[in-house]
Amino acid sequence: MSTKVKETGREPLFHIVRRTDLPFWKSWLIRIAAVVASLLICAVIIVLVTGDNPIQIYATMIKGAVGSPRRIWALLQGVAMLLCVALAVTPAFKMRFWNIGAEGQVLMGGMGAAACMILFGKTLPAPVVLLLVIVVSILAGALWGVIPAFFKAFWNTNETLFTLMMNYIAIQIVSYFTYIWSSNKGNNVINTINADTHVGWLELPASIDKYGYLLNIIIVAVLTVAMYFYLKYSKQGYEISVVGESENTAKYAGINVKKVIIRTMLISGALCGIAGMLLVSGTDHTITPNTAAGRGFTAIMVSWLAKFNPLFMVLTSLLLVFMEKGALEISTVFGLNDSFAAIITGIIIFFIIGSEFFINYSIKKRQKEVEAK
Amino acid sequence: MIAAFIHRAVMQGIPLLFGATGEIITEKSGNLNLGIPGVMYVGGISGVIGAFLYENSLPDKSQANGFLAIMIPLLACLLGSFLMGLLYSFLTTTLRANQNVTGLAITTFGVGLGNFFGGSLIKIVGADVPSISLSTTSRFFSATLPFAKDLGWFGEIFLSYGFLAYLAVIIAIIASLYLKRTRSGLNLRAVGENPATADAAGISVTKYKYTATCVGSMIAGLGGLYYVMDYVSGVWSNDGFGDRGWLAIALVIFTVWKPNFAIIGSILFGGLYIVHNYLNQFFPFIPVDMSTQELIKMAPYVVTVLVLIFNSMRNKRESQPPEALGLPYFREDR
């Protein structure tokens, strides 16, 4: 080593080594440090913009996120919805199938739910409509997910670009139907569907569930645990990891890669469909082209930041939703534009993305000549 | 009427052309920068901030100097989008982060930044104006040749645009020649196709990835600048830029990674984007209501998906995405 340095004399000052031996607690310490650092940077920016005391501002944020029972419920609902979409994209990502079409798959799921509620709301009995809502929205989401998977499996069509385009096709389809079904001809708004009869609504009685979010939260909690076990302990979950590590290895091991790709995207799309159903039938009781509200994209970051572990995703989605609600409160209090939340979210994500480097790699300094001798 | 349609289609297409040219250069280095929509927003808002500060520094709007009125927003736009490109490169190339996640984060951040400053700039600067309306500087951006109006349909189709529109076409042609005819362009394509081989051949993969991504972002940022300063005459409205950034990425696929095709492609996409406004005039016998318009707006995306499928089925070498697109390259991993 030492002689080599002398001979070439051009060994770079640093070199980067992949590390595999970092203890679990250390990697989380680095992540937490990154979040703290990002919060400090955010504080500096907030102070520059508002000119107010940073501690006061963070107090405003906390108040905005968890200041009242209603807000706590809204926070949990936000976490549940983001988490549901994140759960949906995770099996695909573990397989290295870059499904960035969750936005469209959620919308199609919501579309399926809204269609059933509108078309059959007056003619069929309520339990049948609810069943249809569930089945159709899951099928619609799954269909939207499986189309790119089919082409990926058989012709290796680039799935990132394909799923991205499918988002906008879905948005236009929903725009089309919001016009067709709009409550007052031409205003492009569907009022609350079946507001008087509640047909097709996924809800618990108001005596149990005051704010109407509880059922969504329970469903997503069950899905989270189920996904954890599916990925970690089932044969299919194992096949997903193998395909993700190396398609060739999977082939040699006798795994039918095409089948795994299509099956996994069916699951991914179906879960997005469930998210769409929870949003339309369980929460909003209407649909707009913005029903998914960018969750399809944020969910990708949630899933990736949690290293595809469903249980950690609870934490990452809580962090992002908490910051978003808090930043919204700041923008209201200080009369700023509500996109402030997106900036804060962006900064936090940049820091966490950056911190991954220090978890996966270590930087080794060039050894000094004196030491080398 | 057809001349007017083409005129509008070109105006719609120019931001897409900037975005697509920038993204093609970026993708040729193997970086799939999904942050382009955010970068274009940042380019637009940086130009707006530059123009806003310049206009507010003038005691009297009529004294505006044409050179400064163009250069300040232009440089601000280039700087803003350059920084976004640099951030993306730093995260993906130096810190080796996942490209898709980084790109989406850049888009969230960039769109947020644009809307935030668009909505709060007046309050932050403490200016005494009701809304951001940069008609003075915008006038210089949308200035056309004085005799364009006298040339009838020819003038309307070819000569009736601000200088940025011509710049877009020139940049696309230069980019095309650069990729096809120069050694450096060949090296860039090698980096995107197979970075390990390029590295072995002595090409600095890191340098090419950084340069291509930053230059690509600056070009894409100009699309945002063109949109605010020329297309909407300097009036910023939040989310007004809409999904044009994604449409630019669609255009990259549609034109199979060729900037010269993108010139025609952008006009075609621009036309599809607005054709619903003209259908009633062209075909009065076909009833076109608002709902049909929404379906027509779907066309660019459907066409792009079909192109993507067709190209992957035909499996011709020239029309494939760069081989290493979206994949990280770490020399030590081999």
Image (spheres, coloured by chain):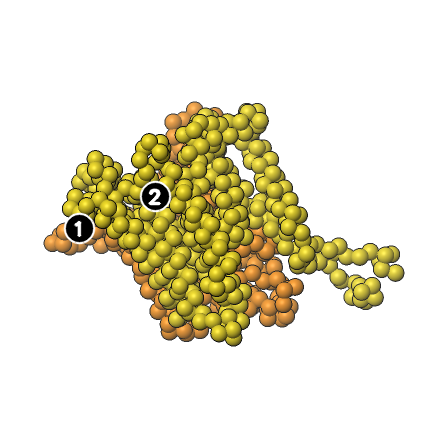
Which picture quadrant has residue A212?
A: top left
Tell me what residue is drawn at x 48 percent, y 61 percent. Answer: A234
Residue density around tag 1, few if under 14, some if 14–19, many if 20 or more, within 10 Å = some
Mark carried by residue A284: none
Q: Chain of mark 1?
A: B
Q: Nearer the viewer, residue A241 or B59?
A: A241
Chain represented in orange: B
Tell me what residue is drawn at x 63 percent, y 67 percent. Answer: B334
Left or right position of A13 against A31: right
Q: Position of residue B9 (x, y in %)?
A: 30, 53
- As shown in the figure, which amino acid type bears the numbered disc 2? Leu
Per the model, the C-alpha gap separating discs 2 and 1 is 32 Å
Q: Is residue B122 visible?
A: no
Vertical placement of A106 versus A256: above or below? above
In the figure, the shade used to draw chain A is yellow
Q: From the image, which quarter does the C terminus of chain A lie in?
A: bottom right
Mark carried by residue A279: 2
Q: Chain of mark 2?
A: A
Q: From the image, which quarter does the N terminus of chain A lie in?
A: bottom right
Q: Position of residue A30 (x, y in %)?
A: 64, 46
